[in-house]
Image (cartoon, rainbow, N blue to C red):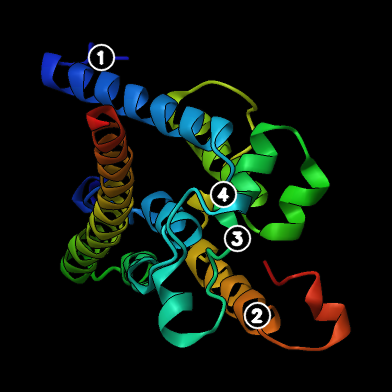
Amino acid sequence: MSDLSNQPAKPNNYLVLAILCTVCCCLPAGVVSIVYAAKVNETYARGEYDLAEKYSSNARTWGIVGLVVGGIGVILYIALIGFGVFAGIMENAGY
Amino acid sequence: MQATSLPKKSFLLAGTAGLLGLLSLYYFFDPHQGAFPACPFYQLTGWFCTGCGSQRALHDLLHLNLLESLGHNLLLLPALVLVAWHGAHLAGVGPKAKSPLGATRAPRYILMVIGIFTLARNLPWDPFQFLAP
């Protein structure tokens, strides 16, 4: 019983974030994040809880990096297109 | 279930709104005609990455063209199903079966699938052409 209470909760491996990143944002950061997710699971299963925590934060960092880079890319692109359309309208309005 | 705090609630709300906005963008604009940015990895290397074709696949999926969606990216639909399953499991709704993503070896298997899929879709021969976006 004491064994069970000494065991810390399993850290999040952010696997869902990593999958979404890999499939949707087409960025290698997602793959790095999945590798760290695997390491979280394996170190936790071996009982190396501190290491699992460290890998967990790495997995989160890489997942967020991929999401932010991909997201910013899409938003920039849409903003540029929107700006181009707007500029075109204004130019035509001048005539 | 405990009550969600206010910041968490507004975060969820903003996330849902953003997701709906994004989905409607992909519903009404057609990535087949270049309405969205092409994959930077493909532009840099000329190789297809794991996510290539997922914008077209999402558009087709939202229009319920399942076969065409799978033809653009075979992994998008299974990935979304797995994520939805996992989300339902975390929220405590849906099927009682354990989410496959919760398994200890899940990340390892996913890496293997992604590796094989990404390699195969770049092969120029016939049976693998279906995997290319």
Say which amino acid is labelled 1.
Gln
Of residues B54 and B90, the one drawn nearer to the viewer in this rendering: B54
- The percent coordinates of residue B17 (x first, y second) are 34, 22
The chain letter under disc 4 is B
Q: Which residue is mark 2?
A: B116
Query: Within the image, what quadrant is residue B63 found in?
Result: top right
Specify the amino acid type for callout 4: Pro
User: In this image, A39 relative to A53: left or right?
Assistant: right
Write down the chain letter for disc 3. B
Circle 1 sits on which residue? B2
Q: Earlier in the sequence, mark 3 or mark 1?
A: 1
Query: Which one is closest to the eye, mark 1 or mark 2?
Result: 2
| Left or right: A58 as drawn, with respect to B60 | left
Among numbered discs 4 and 3, the one appearing first in the sequence: 4
Q: Position of residue A91 (x, y in %)?
A: 25, 37
Q: Residue at x 80, y 79 (%)?
A: B128
Q: Are marks 1 and 2 on the same chain?
A: yes
**Is there CB contact under 8 Å for labels 1 and 2?**
no
The residues bearing labels 4 and 3 have C-alpha atoms spaced at a distance of 9 Å
For label 4, the residue is: B31
Question: What kind of element bears circle 4?
Answer: helix
Outermost residue toward the right in this view: B126
Marks 4 and 2: in contact by CB < 8 Å?
no
Question: CA–CA distance between discs 3 and 1?
Answer: 40 Å
> What kind of element bears circle 1?
loop
Label 3 Cα neighbours within 10 Å, binned few <14 / some 14-19 / many ≥20: many
- What residue is drawn where x is 57% and y is 32%? B27
